[in-house]
Amino acid sequence: MSLNKLEKIYPSNAQAQRERFEKAKEKYESIFGDKPQRFFSASGRSEVGGNHTDHNCGRVLACAVSLDVIACVTPRDDSIIRVKSEGFPEDEIDISSLEAKESELNSSAALIRGVAAALNRMGYKIGGFNAYTTSSVLKGSGISSSAAFEVLIGNILGSLYNGGEIDAVKIAMASQTAENEFFGKPSGLMDQMASSVGGFITIDFKDLKAPEIKAIDFDFEKYGHSLCIVDTKGSHADLTPEYAAIPAEMKSVAEFFAKDCLRELDKSVVLKNYEALRRRCGDRAVLRALHFFDENDRVSRQAEALEKGDFDKFLKLVNESGYSSYCYLQNIYANSDPKNQGMSLGLYTAKSVLGDRGACRVHGGGFAGTIQAFVPNDLLDEFIKAQENLFGEGACHVLSIRPVGGTEVDLT
């Protein structure tokens, strides 16, 4: 973990971000009555390839994006963490107790306590602090506001009490623990890793204790395309069972062969055992497993295409990923709520504008979240207008890749 200046974190709009931090400092002072001493930032993320592969030890292609959550912070000399996030009630957590609390399930308090507990288990020091946070990573926008918040808390504890010596991978792991064990949402490690590490990366989770991370040097703008994320404005309420079913069904196929996860299997073994698997696990589980194998392989081919500058092949693979998620992974709408299919409408609208150019797919967990599109710049205005006509003004976000992950910020 490092200390970075605004110009490195926000290469295209450093002055605007300085003004944002100044406003956050004023808000901190009005709440806590003193001046903040330290400043932090953690980015949202975009999954580019590897839809629902991380939880079965697969590969992903992801990037940190230009939307982030920032914090103004002062350390305390006790075990109390007070966090006031813009638009939300203040959390006050006493980390002298590091047990998960049922009363904190699905809350930001659970994430704060969970990150502190996970870092403490790893042998790192923890302590209290006051913080005011404000975020451009809209909650429920599919850019992973929860992972950005977790990574932010990890960076604060890392800098205040560990001299900035906790590396980005450890902070990501602690963040996942917080989300899984304390918040109560089963998830893989991709969101937290992309937010924590930063840049444009591939991550191979074959060894969960030591994920293999590789940076990719690629700029979509050089190829005349923009990365767009469209918020379809669906509600994530009551969707945890839908999300949880995906890794559970994939792992049920692995367990049929006495394996812990699908990464330990070869697709050919599944193809040879269709009849028994369909009886034991059900057709949807088999289809989701087949998606995993194809998507896991697709990530490697996407990375190779980008490294070779073969952008047309990359776009073809993005569209293939979207098709597989729609037909086989089946995370475009919730079976429990078939009347609401905003993502399907968003994808149809995207295809109507793009035709045989660009690419579009589900983005992230799915069901009621966002779609992703790589839009030729000459179609960008038309694309934004079409999506915002469907989902409302501000629904379409044009993003850039952020070079820095979770970090302490140098405002001098």
Image (spheres, rainbow, N blue to C red):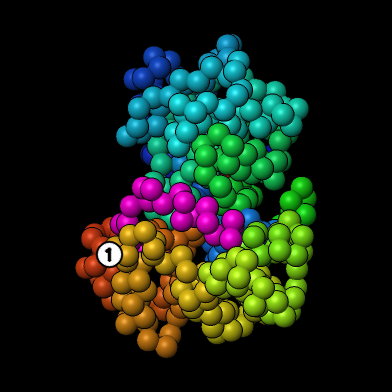
Residue 90 location, quadrant: top left
Q: Residue at x 52, y 39 (%)?
A: 184
Rendered location of residue 81, percent (x, y): 52, 20
Direction bottom: furthest residue? 356
Q: Nearer the viewer, residue 151 or 7?
A: 151
Depth order, front residue of 181/391: 181
Up/down of 169 relative to 106, above or below: below
Residue located at (53% from left, 17% from top): 94
In the rendered image, residue 239 lying in the magenta stretch gets the answer yes
| 388 in relation to 87, above or below | below
In the structure shown, which secondary structural element does the residue marked by tag 1 occupy?
loop
Residue placed at 75% from the left, 65% from the top?
257
How many numbered badges does the structure rendering display? 1
Q: In the image, which residues are magenta?
A: 228-249
Q: Position of residue 327 (x, y in %)?
A: 48, 76
Q: Reply yes or no: does residue 139 show up in magenta.
A: no
Residue 282 sits above or below residue 45 on the image? below
Say which of 193 and 249 sits in front.
249
Residue drawn where x is 48% and y is 43% of the image: 146
> Residue at the top extreme?
77
Would you say residue 222 is visible in this rendering? no
Counting from the top left corner in percent of width and height, residue 246 is at 54, 59
Other residues around mark 1 within 10 Å, as few (<14) / some (14–19) / many (≥20): few
Q: Is residue 236 above or below residue 47?
A: above
> What residue is disc 1 on?
339
Looking at the rendered image, the quarter that the N terminus falls into is top right
Q: Is residue 394 visible?
A: yes
Whether residue 153 sits left or right of residue 346 in the image: it is: right
Residue 298's spot in the image, x, y percent? 64, 75
Q: Amino acid at mark 1?
A: Lys
